[in-house]
Image: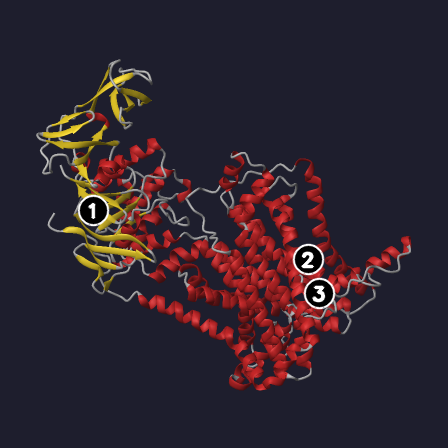
Amino acid sequence: MSQPAVVCAQLTRTFSNVTAVNGLNLSVQSGTILAVIGPSGCGKTTLLRLLAGFERPTAGQISIGGRLVAGAGHWLPPDKRQVGMVFQNYALFPHLTVFENVAYGLARLPRAARVAQVQRLLELVGLSAQQGRLPHELSGGQQQRVALARALAPEPAVVLLDEPFSNLDATLRRTMRGEVRSILHATGATAVFVTHDQEEALFLGDQIAVINQGHLEQVGGPEVIFQSPATRFVADFMGTTDFVPGQVVADGLATEIGFLPLQLKLPVGAAVDVAVRADDLHLALDAQAPGQIVARQFLGAQQLYQVRLPSGLVVHSLQPHVQDWLVGAAVRVRLAPGHPLACFQDGERVA
Amino acid sequence: MGTWLSQVPRSALTAEAALWLAAALVVALVLLPTLYLGLRAVEGGPAAWSQLLRPRVLATLGHTLALAGAVTLCSALLAVPLAWLTTRTDLPLRRWWSVLLPLPLVIPSYVGAYLFASALGPRGLLQQALEGPFGVTRLPDLYGFPGATLTLTLLTYPYLLLGLRAALLQHDPALEEASRSLGVTPWQTFRRVTLPLLRPALGAGGLLVALYALRDFGAVAIMRYDTLTRAIYVQYRTFDRSGTAVLALALVALTLGLVVFEARWRGRSSIARVGPGTSRPPLRVALGRWRWPALLFCAAVVAVSLVLPAGVLVFWLVRGLRAGENLPAIGLSAWHSLAASGLGALATLLAALPIAFLAARRPGRLTRWLERLTYALFALPGVVVALALVFFGANFLPGLYQTLPMLVAAYIILFLPQAVGAVRAALLQVQPQHAEVARSLGRGPLAVLWTITLPLMRPGLVAGAALVFLTIMKELPATLILAPLGYKTLATGMWSAVSEAFFAQAAAPALLIIVLSSVPLALLQFGERNQSP
């Protein structure tokens, strides 16, 4: 952990009229996985292509493995950067066998070392038996493992993965997620992967960078990102979040669904939004209560209810599956977070 | 980590510079005839230019445009249903039709026109056959516009057909399935999904057909229809080189207009396939009671465009043999044809590589015009290119005059557009990610080209080479003028036999040309089966 494997400084990429990446500062520690997450079109794929050297930055710098690769008059083409790339569609060379695909980046090694390295990687991803096959003879999960082995074979300074699981079905996606994580950790590789799936980011990322419209909104560990979102965008993007309006009073915050003993550095009467997740609310049947269940979704172990409050605001609440209430039932809604909630004013965090 | 990845900073610009340099050299070669024309036209002064306004010349321009328009329209009317029937329906004998239908490509226009005229023209074979039983002494006059349109349509619709078939085979069938599942009828699906997706193929194929009609000399000469190429040839025979040059430049201007028109029409539609969808065999439309009319349609096209000319050729050959005419030994000229066409196809393909790469992978204003320029020059008639090279060779490179390299240079100039089109199409089939992955695995641009891009392009490259090969095999005027002394090919041998009215002697090399150039085409069509799962 001596030095970061990847450093971006004030990285900017502008296309003719769109700024895809805007003044990004980011660093990835050696041996860790950074998940870059954001809605589609937020610039995360451009970031990956800038790192790989398929795009040139408009401004700013990139260092990989302690070496300046782009910016300040320097430019290293992709083949000199020591980056491994795993594409969304894997981009396996269709005319080469599994073995040849993995060996492709090892052309400079002597033959014996090359064979040994390919065998080692194929063993790691569990495809030694398939080494003579052509890509189209493999299943989706196998193709992905070949793509990963191929990217890891030259022992790059960083592996870049572009939406690596989006082509797999749900069950396989879950299995592959675990496998990819253990393969990456087993090789001690540094990885940057982009995704729009928060569950994937929380599971795989040692660190998570949330990007919106080319801006870095927040970077941090999964728990920090989830529990302590820095901006309203992050709170909204990570998890099912409702924003309940609140008003600063003398000793805390008053909301439609309860009082919060939060001390904000804001004048009394100021309006804020409180980020409330579905597990922060307590529901109870009460014929006199003003809340009304408007929809419910059975998730197996839990029920997800949507409740309309008198103000018209609809909030989400997760309940154990045995709480089996009908749509239309009147319920009392109460804030019961058990932990501090994040508050925002004009999209910025105030508590 | 990564100790063996080279740390040597080698300029990445060298490969890029080499690419542009190669493209520039090719463009310089291709521009040579036009520069010669320009020089000659300027020498001629206002007198040479004023002839453009003569009523006769204006009428010729009108004829040329009318012919190009009619041939393109008729070809599309044949090619679109044929392509769809042979790829997307349960038409019986599909495999056979897909082999037979493109075959008219191998018939040179002068041979085709001659055969159609002798079969369908006044006192032709059809009229003779009808005279006995039915007493028919006159058929509608074939000569002029109808004959030229008929001949050129039947010989050039395969250009459109091949492109459309390739596009139909390449499309993700899921698009049509999605349309059907949205409750849209097969016909509406064809009109609203398939046809718009075919727009690039229609544009590119239609452009090839129209350019073929614009530059053709053989068919219009035999069908006695006055177009620009014929006027150029007549003018050239009067030794008025400036006048010739002005007319030829007018032809180039016409084609430039056509190329720009096609680019506008094609719009910004991209043919790159989105998404990873593995290709599956398409949903075949059941023709039901339409299957017999469809079958009849295919059979009729094959009968008129292929069986009729081939039959007439065989008829001449047999009649000559019966009459005891001496047939020339054609072994040597067959070898000459193969060698010249093979060399020409290889050289043309190599020349097309840098331009196609720039056009497909470095999209921009400059590369777009580079590509259009190569298409525009497709309009240069073979006779003009050959004369320009003769002039240039005689003055600057006397050592190369009437040598094989000079002939090959003419072939490059004449057939570069075909090759660029094919290479570009092959390149667009290769996902850019493959090259990107290879680059990030530490290989330089040239290594990636050699180990990844070219192997993946191979099917398309082979197809392109085959197409150029058989076009060269048919080429007449440039071969006639530029071939080394005594270097007789099948085409030139046949031409001299036809001009001396030795029909039986012309029939043998003509048949051989058709057979030899059918081989690669047939192989390509059968190859489709192995590629599509």
Under circle 2, the secondary element is: helix
Residue situated furthest top in the rendering: A287
Q: Nearer the viewer, mark 2 or mark 3?
A: 2
Along the line of sight, the residue nearer the viewer: A215 or A2: A215
Circle 1 residues within 10 Å: few <14, some 14–19, many ≥20 = many
Q: Residue B449 location, x and y as percent? A: 39, 59
Along the line of sight, the residue nearer the viewer: A249 or B520: A249
Residue under mark 3: which chain is it in? B
Residue under mark 1: which chain is it in? A
Circle 2: residue type = Leu
Residue at image mark 1: A190
Q: Is residue B175 above or below residue A4?
A: above
Question: N-terminal of the two: label 2 or label 3?
Answer: 3
Any part of residue B331 in sight:
no
Asked which quadrant contains residue A119, the reply is top left
Circle 3: residue type = Val
Asked which quadrant contains residue A37, the reply is top left
Whole-number angstrom distance, CA of label 2 to CA of label 3: 12 Å
Q: Residue B154 has which mark? A: 2
Q: Residue A39 location, x and y as percent? A: 30, 42
Any part of residue A254 in sight:
yes
| Lateral position of residue A162 relative to residue B278, left or right | left
| Lateral position of residue B139 relative to residue B486, left or right | right
Q: Residue at x 63, y 60 (%)?
A: B516
